[in-house]
Image: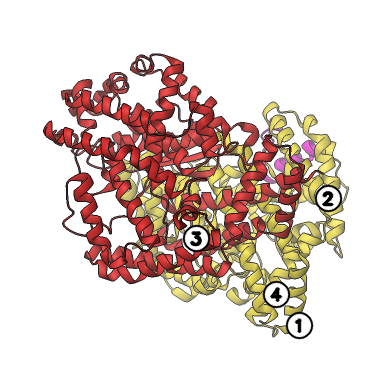
Chain colours: A red, B yellow
Amino acid sequence: MSSIAALKQLYADIDALQGAEALMAWDQQVFMPPGSAGARAAHLGCLLRMSHELFTSDKMQRLIEEAAKEAEPGTEDAATVRVLKRALDQRTKIPATLVEEKGRLGTLGHEIWAKARQDNDFGHFAPILGQLIELTKQEGECLGYTDHIYDALTDQYEEGATKKSWDHMFDGIRKPIVELVAAIKEAGPVDDSALYGDWPEADQRAFCDHIARAVGFDFNIGRQDTAVHPFCGGPSTTDVRLTTRFKNYLPSAIMGTLHEAGHGMYEQGTPVEWAGSPLAGGVSLGWHESQSRTWENIVGRSHAFWTFMLPKLHEAFPATKAFDADSFVKLLNKVEPSFIRVEADEVTYSLHIMVRFEIECALMDGSLAVKDLPEFWNEKYRSYLGIVPETDSVGCLQDVHWSAGAFGYFPTYAMGSILSYQVFDCLRADLGDVDAMMAKGEFAPILHWLQEKVYRQGKRYTPADLVQRVTGKAFGPEAYIAGISAKYKALYGI
Amino acid sequence: MSSIAALKQLYADIDALQGAEALMAWDQQVFMPPGSAGARAAHLGCLLRMSHELFTSDKMQRLIEEAAKEAEPGTEDAATVRVLKRALDQRTKIPATLVEEKGRLGTLGHEIWAKARQDNDFGHFAPILGQLIELTKQEGECLGYTDHIYDALTDQYEEGATKKSWDHMFDGIRKPIVELVAAIKEAGPVDDSALYGDWPEADQRAFCDHIARAVGFDFNIGRQDTAVHPFCGGPSTTDVRLTTRFKNYLPSAIMGTLHEAGHGMYEQGTPVEWAGSPLAGGVSLGWHESQSRTWENIVGRSHAFWTFMLPKLHEAFPATKAFDADSFVKLLNKVEPSFIRVEADEVTYSLHIMVRFEIECALMDGSLAVKDLPEFWNEKYRSYLGIVPETDSVGCLQDVHWSAGAFGYFPTYAMGSILSYQVFDCLRADLGDVDAMMAKGEFAPILHWLQEKVYRQGKRYTPADLVQRVTGKAFGPEAYIAGISAKYKALYGI
């Protein structure tokens, strides 16, 4: 057997363990009885250790080395080796003791953070945040970097990304977005209170299933359930599981469903012959987020989409009959600076991310001390969003990420928003009048284009190479700035 | 670390893999999207191989040997070693090639059997049944036996059972049950058509959850869902998952729920300190079935139970208000010889099993040829039940077991029925007027007695030892015969 074949065979066991882990993690959020948390944690801990041991085994390391010599450059096999080599590096460069210590501190940090956020007491969180930053710096040193320690950290989440590349990205959007937000503010407030109400959960659930099916999420190889924190998971690319939740703000579950369905359709788009292989699934967090944002924002918040979907909404929720597509889409795209990232609109969202990115870099290179974080945060919100949080709970304590020592993750959210426009522009150029299609409920051509260009590529190319292949140029914010400027200037009559 | 401690630590990994396997198997029957069968089969296959390899590893074998020397006889540690040694023997005595060949033939056999049953074509099934019998005989030779090859086979399902012990069991019930059935037939037919109807599924579901909760199934460490073939599964004794299905025969789901809840409460009764250990869960198939039968038949088909539960049934299904406890319990306990085992009543059920047992023994010792099976089957039905199946589809083709080469399993069903009465008689002797308790909805004393005497013992003792400890004597049919004779003579006024 060739080394490549042996490598793929060994990987099948890792894939089985990871599939089981994913099913257990999904089940834990969706159906697990509350009293079995202990047994689940024990089982999951064992499986995670087993898959890690298998991944870092001598056999795996040897096979990767041998296969690297064997695989012809540019082939699928070479891509397989590249993907596995990168994952192996990430698992082996950081000593087990450091991984363990960070796991321990992260669990503790999560508890302390939750209490600090509840009590609005940053002082309670500050000491352990300091320790987590120190450990994360050690991690960065183990991983290695040329320019800035942030490069080592953020590369874990987005292959090839650096502080410099993120700087470049944010430099391209900072001024136009801040100016757009200011102009929208001047155009006057939008009253979307009609979207809040006592919307029956069963009706929301049925409508969300309908909408996921309509855009092309395949329920033959997927399902949708309810969870407190919505996510897209599941054990394989032929078993993709969305979750949503139901709130009194009607678009919450609908937009959440389109977002998770975007992630889900990306996973489901893996070629059959790659299922269970190292090339299956989305290539990076930024790319993944670009697809959830595409279906949520570019498709799901468009006038064309609601031209088709509004009659169905009227049927499901008769109180919405007061809206036509114009008025509904205006409310759905309400822009208003606010404190909480996860509730932010499409325009202000990237500003929330920018604040976090600048803080992370400053914390990592030591130019910002932990004790000064709240003030720094508030100053950034004043400067970019024109508002200042009244408490740290709705300020620098709002996100879970840092409590687990995850630094370098946030920029991938902004990358997703920005990349979604860059890719969709190319789709429009290829397909012609996409709005006319959506207005007739024809989402298949859009999905097929994305499948062909993106989803079927799996992890075959690096994230940057894939941008080049799909869009013909390097990743950049031009399409995003042009796209949202045009959209919101029209909506707000600016 | 002692060998025992090392053994338990190694077993934790096996338990984690088996827990994942159980969750995957449950999910497959309940929630898995249809298009992911392939990926699930691949994942499950890998995990089953991994847990098998771990169980039969040199390390495991060495630790069991060492721990056997270390453990004081009669202690929990000795029981742990005994349980693992038995499982290891079962996994190692049969060569991997034979296991693989039987797995292959079993999968094929299942397909062929399903088609043969559908087409009422025994001739289509006969050749592969012959092959499966040959392979099963080889299996029996590998496992070893003193008296009869059936001993080797049936011991896999019920530790310590032999052809002789099952002969003894059936000899004790054959005549009295056949006579009881004849007497009931003479007493005249019961018309239970009022139990059939268009019972709304949502109401059935709610009532089944209510009834499971009422008898003591703990939803904090368990749940109930819907599946085509009801079963009790789940990844741990703190995560026990029942399934049921809804039919137009109202008692179907209700009795099914009580049956599976009986299995489930046995699992849930495992002591916390044994969770995930080799001693967790029920000790044998026969013992397990005794508990499902207890809650289904002895509790759930009793006059006392429905004295309490009937008002709830009236509330859930107003059409049942025509019944009082007397009339409802009479219909619920309708006895009538019929062809299909899984639909049989409590009295005729063991006769169905007896037919199968006698056929299995004859097939294994060669006194019955495969080609003569249908005639032999029909003759047995005529002799024991007084009816002759008109087709093999409702005759010797009805059960799935033989199509997978499972010979020696059936008698454990009859053992369950018989043992349930033997144990419940002791419970009555200890607790006094159990009927008065049930009539008030007080099921806790019953459950606590069973937990203390049986469920909390896990796999600590052999099945036979547990019978002796719980009932003070060896397993025997006396209580069963006395119990169902008294019950049905009263119901039918014989």
Distance from label 4 to label 1 (Cα)? 10 Å
Q: Which mark is residue A160?
A: none
Which residue, given by chain and number where applicable, does mark 3 sit on? A140
Where disc 1 sits, the SS reads helix
Viewer can see residue A215: yes
Along the line of sight, which residue is nearer the eye, A17 or B440? A17
Secondary element at tag 2: helix
Q: Residue shown at 39%/57% (left/top)?
A: B213
State the residue at coordinates (53%, 40%): A283
Amino acid type assigned to the residue bearing label 3 in the image: Gly
Is the residue at mark 2 from the same chain as the one at mark 4? Answer: yes
Chain letter for the residue marked with disc 4 in the picture: B
Residue matched to label 4: B81
Kind of residue sitting beneath label 1: Lys
Say the numbered circle drawn on residue B98. 2
Q: Are marks 4 and 3 in contact (CB under 8 Å)?
A: no
Residue B82 drawn at (x, y percent): 71, 73
Report the span colored magenta: B373-394
Please state which of the two labelled residues, at mark 3 or mark 1, is closer to the viewer: 3
Type of the residue with mark 2: Leu
- Which corner quadrant of the image does residue A419 belong to? top left
Residue for badge 1: B69
Place of residue B432 in the rendered image (x, y in percent of width and height, measured from the top left): 43, 73
Q: Is disc 2 on the same chain as disc 3?
A: no
Disc 4 crowd, CA 10 A, few/some/many (<14, 14-19, 20+):
many
User: Where does the image place residue B81, in percent across and percent down from the top left?
Assistant: 70, 74
